Amino acid sequence: MNDLTEEQIRTELALILDRRSADTRLSTMGAGSDDLDEGRRYLANTVRDGWHVPTWPREHGGQDASAHQNSLIGRVLREFVVPDLYPFAIGLGMVGPALLQHGTEVQQRDWLKPIASGEAIWCQMFSEPEAGSDLANVALTAQQDGDEWILGGQKTWTSRAMWADWAICLARTDPTQPKHKGLTMFAIPMSLSGVEIRPLMQMNRDAHFSEVFVDGARISDQCRIGDVGEGWRVAMTVLAHERAGGGSRGGGDGNARGL
């Protein structure tokens, strides 16, 4: 599919998506509107042929597209109705690329396709109440216990936590190391015992940010992303894609959304 022309892409997309018109009213998350169904339907319709994440491998919901083909698909997609994908953006634009670079084959197999299809929503648990603006001041701890890790601490301003099935979480695994070197990245199921989500209600009735409290939550070592002590490197990959606007393709009014 890498060799499709612009008109061929347009023809293929017209089989699964509605075209935009002057009368099209696009969905926007927020102000109390938290309908996830439109986004899930769109991603479920586009995942088979890899239209939303074309550069991902085919087996993970992409189409192995080149950068040029990816740009062409993105341009044509703007002609069609794409719902607001804000709830899915961290998974699509930040976690997915990080897993492709740092994840194991098993992690990629288990997590990427559900991200691409809209089946799984991910959030990012980086910010902490006492860390200030320096991400390396992370205090949430992860202590190894055999083949498991025990996590404890607090994250704040976690967007999408209220919807999330999974979180990518930066934790301190070695307090004796310099602050950038004692960190490890994990994937945490948000339904896990010991994880409590407290939404932060804003003046416009949005509750898209949350505090997350973690107390004695146990996860398998298979949920570790990258090597022990390499969490800062994984975090930089995640943030590089955030700065590049990862996950903003589509999205209600078609504008890039804050991640």
Image: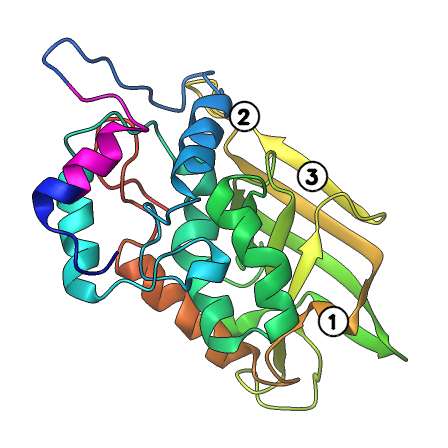
Residue drawn where x is 33% and y is 64% of the image: 64
Left or right of 87 in this view: 189? right
Residue drawn where x is 64% and y is 50% of the image: 166
The residue at which mark 2 appears reads as 201
Residue 63 numbered mark, or none: none
| Amino acid under disc 3 | Ile
Confirm or deny contact between disc 2 and disc 1 (CB under 8 A). no
The residue at which mark 1 appears reads as 222
The percent position of residue 234, horizontal first and vertical second, equals 49, 75
Q: Is residue 234 magenta?
A: no
Between 165 and 156, the residue placed more toward the observer is: 165
Confirm or deny contact between disc 3 and disc 1 (CB under 8 A). no
Q: Is residue 170 visible?
A: no
Of labels 2 and 1, earlier in sequence is 2
Left or right of 9 in this view: 100? right
Between disc 2 and disc 1, the foreground one is 1
Between 219 and 58, the residue placed more toward the observer is: 58
Q: Is residue 158 visible?
A: yes
The percent position of residue 142, horizontal first and vertical second, equals 75, 71
Outermost right residue: 146
Q: Is residue 18 magenta?
A: yes
Region of the chain picked out in magenta, as a range: 9-20
The residue at which mark 3 appears reads as 197
Left or right of 148 in this view: 40? left
| Amino acid under disc 2 | Met
Of labels 3 and 1, earlier in sequence is 3
The percent position of residue 113, horizontal first and vertical second, equals 53, 52
Q: From mark 3 to mark 1, how far is it between C-alphas? A: 23 Å
Residue drawn where x is 81% and y is 68% of the image: 220
